[in-house]
Image: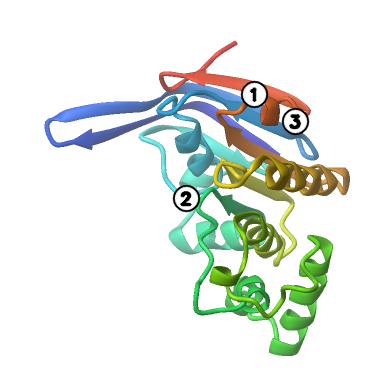
Amino acid sequence: MIRTEKLSKTYRMGEVEVQALQDVSLEIKGGEFVAIIGPSGSGKSTLLNMIGCLDKPTSGAVFIDGTDTGSLTENALAEIRREKIGFIFQQFNLIHTLNALENVALPMFFAGVARETRLKKAETLLVKVGLEKRMYHKPSELSGGQQQRVAIARALANDPGIIVGDEPTGNVDTEAGDAIMNILEGLNGEGRTIIVVTHDAEIAARAGRTKRMRDGKLLE
């Protein structure tokens, strides 16, 4: 389902070039649960951004379902992000003026789904992540763990086959982190491909396969 070939990414910071990724080749099959682990600055989040079509490599290629994403227009990339990939971020990235139900329904609005249909599906997704009693609460009225569960429900809004999580348990306590991992394991059990990056060995150990990164390189 996902393949990277000799993926490299260089950022320029003033007069200095930073090599964030160096010749990273990785294959992830449909239905896998893969954790990418490494210290801060190892390149794992950069790799996730490439896989999620949020950024473009300096060299190399990313293939999703056999399609070279480097050959696609911005509109085509946006379509892949909207329909095939669900994103979960460490900072939750919820819209604070919207309640949980509205946050989950928002991606379906951009996909052109009718209001009644998207609100009904958003309700179903919030029940799925155990927030049926918090649907009309705004992010400021929710705990960190609850906000992340809203973010997971939002990631599922357009029924993507791939879920990518950038430190999805990084801003919550241990109990909430365990609940989030239980949800991700359940989604994987439904056949979705799950990719998370983390610096936590205990979180990584719950994935089906672990890959390690250091200094922009994927370790054997």
| Residue 14 picture location, percent across and down | 13, 36
Residue 188 appears left or right of 200: right
Spatial separation of the CA atoms under disc 2 and disc 1: 26 Å
| Residue 159 picture location, percent across and down | 75, 62
Residue 201 numbered mark, or none: 1
SS state under label 2: loop
Residue 184 numbered mark, or none: none
Q: In this view, does 150 lie above or below 220?
A: below
The numbered mark, 1 or 3, whose residue comes first in the sequence reads 1
Could you tell me which quadrant the N terminus lies in? top right
Could you tell me which quadrant the C terminus lies in? top right
* Foreground disc of the pair 3, 2: 3
Spatial separation of the CA atoms under disc 3 and disc 2: 23 Å
Residue 190 appears left or right of 63: right
Kind of residue at disc 3: Ala
Kind of residue at disc 2: Leu
Q: Within 10 Å of the Cα at label 1, are there few (<14), some (14-19), or many (20+) other Cα atoms?
A: few
Spatial separation of the CA atoms under disc 1 and disc 3: 10 Å
Tell how many labels.
Answer: 3
Disc 3 marks which residue? 207
Residue in the picture at 69% in, 26% down = 202
The numbered mark, 3 or 2, whose residue comes first in the sequence reads 2
